[in-house]
Image: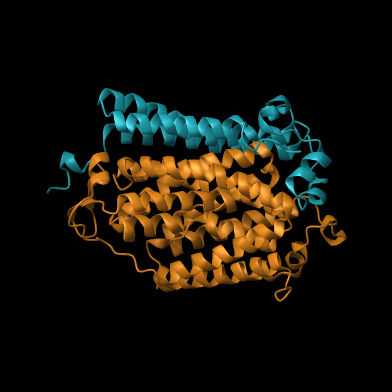
Amino acid sequence: MLKSRINMLGGQLFVLMAMVMTCPGIATATETMVDPAISSKPWWFWPLVLFVFCLVLGVLAVMAGVGGGVLYVPLVSGFFPFHIDFVRGIGLMVALAGALAAGPGLLKRNLANLRLALPVALIASTCSIAGAMLGLYLSSLNPDIIQACLGATIIGIACLLLFSKNTEKPVVTKQDAIGMALGIQGIYWDDGAQESVEWKTHRTLLGLFMFIIIGLLAGLFGLGAGWANVPVFNLLMGVPLKVSVATSKFLLSITDTSAAWIYLNRGCVIPLIAVPSIVGLMLGSFLGVRILAVAKPKMIRYMVIGVLFFAGFKALDKGLGLGFMG
Amino acid sequence: MDKDNDALKASEEQVLYANVLMIGVLAGLVLMGVTYFIYLTGIFPAHVDMSYLPQVWGKNVNEYLHLTNTPHGWEWTKLLMKGDFLNYIGFALLGLMTVGCYLLLVRGYMRQKDWAYTAISVLEIIVLCVAASGLLGGGGH
């Protein structure tokens, strides 16, 4: 009974988000020029809507197993009147806050692993700085470039989420030299299986190289990079899924810190909209974790992937100036 | 292996990192709540009037900074008596948390004579400090 009510709640939250996104007031807000209809709204209207929107987003993100950043940037840039410069800056702050909040628990349970995280964090955080600077430069030339590239990336992420099949415990027969030299291995307790699981990595060099691209994309678009971290750790490097997800979440707190500072120092974080975004998403994540224990997240995950496809096509449409989607 | 086996427990530096991070995050969130309240209630007047923001938040950041006469880089510290910029303290705390935790890691790895991870941690601190310094991409005009 409770499970069916929770699943219904998940569906209702999805419908609520869809209603917010399709509200005519928000539809007209996608213009970046000053619009009399927008400026007639009181200043607190958009932060309040954003808070509620982010609360729902936080719940859905946890239930769908995706990060808040990957939903925040395309959806807010597509349906709210804020310029993409500010959306990316705040998106990074949102992803950072979420990762910092989740980090302690994951580290203490030994699910997030420092020996795995630190080398990749160094590469990803350095490249995210470059990505952030490139993103701000391209945006100053023409924000449509970023919008179109964001749309294409989001569609790619949605495809990755849809088609990739993660492996719970990959088999790694032999650790490579780099992984062995850095001591990237560990052991954790699997509560579900009631057993200890030892793990080690392979294809470590290729994995480290992938984090160059991941860092660049994270900084460029203001996304958290969990959607990319997990497949690289799990499918490429052979890290068990639970350790991959936990270490990825922790890793975001380092990668996003460096990119967030670039946007913060450039003035891309407006407090009036940043704080409700951060607080809304974190509260939503908190609620989402509670609901996740009793809900069937698979249905929500497919809904969210559908939303990502929609948001991606919307951003692409906006960036290319096609006008198919309003 | 038994669930309570020491081999399954997080390392000392991992637990210390987690504890410091937890305290810092809580402090950052509480601080953000307090400063946001001060901002919304107008106890400290804002640098950019709230009613003006809807007219400029649709512009790119360069135009926004110019129209609102907002500084970039660390010059926000000169405007801490303004309600909106007071919120930057919370943002900065979240941004500096990782640097503080990494300093603890350096100490831990040096004690263990794990020079590879000591070097990785030191390099990361340098990267984060360079990002935070405003030397890169801090120009708004």
Q: Give the farthest residue toward the left.
A: B1
Q: Residue at x 21, y 57 (%)?
A: A172
Q: Residue at x 58, y 57 (%)?
A: A72
Q: Give the farthest residue toward the bottom.
A: A324
Coloring basis for residues? by chain
Depth check, front residue: A71 or A258: A258
Q: Residue at x 54, y 38 (%)?
A: B29
Up/down of B138 relative to A180, above or below: above
Depth check, front residue: B124 or A92: B124
Q: Quadrant of the N terminus of chain A?
A: bottom left
Q: How many marks?
A: 0
Up/down of A35 relative to A95, above or below: below
Q: x, y (%) of residue B98?
A: 46, 34
Q: Quadrant of the C terminus of chain A?
A: bottom right
Q: Residue at x 72, y 24 (%)?
A: B78
Per the rendering, the colour in which chain A appears is: orange
Q: x, y (%) of residue A239?
A: 28, 54
Q: In the rendered image, what is the letter of the chain coloured cyan? A: B
Decide if residue A6 is in sight here.
no
Depth check, front residue: A281 or B129: B129
